[in-house]
Amino acid sequence: MSDKVQQLQSIEQSRQAIGAQKQQLQAQLFEAENALKELETAKTAYKIVGGIMVKSDIDSLKKELSERKEALDLRAKTLDSQEAKLVEKAKDLQKDVMNE
C-alpha cells in the first residue's frame, strides 16, 4: 500500500513541475503575442542578440516570433497532455488505494 502512496506523491510532484512549466510557457506566449502586436504598428524594430540590441527587419522578426509562438503552443499542448495522463493515473491509483 505504501508503494501506491509513494507513486501518488511522485505523480503530484510531477504535476506541480508541469504546472510550473506551463506558467513559464504562458508568460513566454504572452510576451510573444504582445511583441507581435507591437510590430503591427512599428516603423522600426530591434532584436536583442547576445546582450546587444540590433536593428532588425520587421517582417523577419514577425516570422521569428510567429514560429516561436507556434513552438510554444505545441509545447503547451504537450504539457496539457502529460498533465491529463498524470491526473488519470492518479485517479486510478487513488481508487486502488481506497479499495485496499
Image: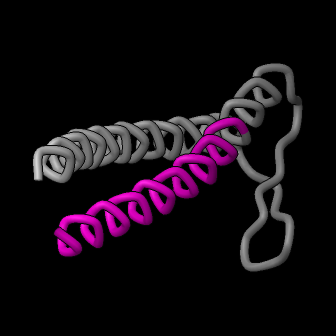
Image: 55 above or below 30: below
The quadrant in which residue 92 appears is top left
Considering depth in this image, is 28 or 98 the residue closer to the camera? Answer: 98
Image: 17 above or below 50: above
Image: 17 above or below 71: below
Considering depth in this image, is 61 or 16 the residue closer to the camera? Answer: 16
User: Could you tell me residue 95's position as x and y percent?
Assistant: 17, 41
Seen as rendered, the residue at the extreme bottom is 50
Q: Is residue 23 magenta?
A: yes
User: Could you tell me residue 24's position as x and y percent?
Assistant: 62, 53
Say which residue appears at 86% left-offset and 65% top-offset. 53
What are the residue bounds of the magenta stretch?
1-30
Horizontal arrangement in the rendering, residue 46 relative to residue 22 (left or right): right
Considering depth in this image, is 33 or 38 the residue closer to the camera? Answer: 33
Rendered image coloring scheme: one colour
Say which residue appears at 83% left-offset and 44% top-offset. 45
Say which residue appears at 44% left-offset and 37% top-offset. 73
- Chief secondary structure of the magenta span? helix
Horizontal arrangement in the rendering, residue 100 relative to residue 34 (left or right): left
For the N terminus, the quadrant is bottom left
Seen as rendered, the residue at the extreme front is 100
Horizontal arrangement in the rendering, residue 79 relative to residue 7 (left or right): right
* Count of number-bearing discs: 0
User: Could you tell me residue 89's position as x and y percent?
Assistant: 19, 47
Say which residue appears at 74% left-offset and 51% top-offset. 56
User: Could you tell me residue 15's position as x and y percent?
Assistant: 42, 54
Considering depth in this image, is 49 or 9 the residue closer to the camera? Answer: 9
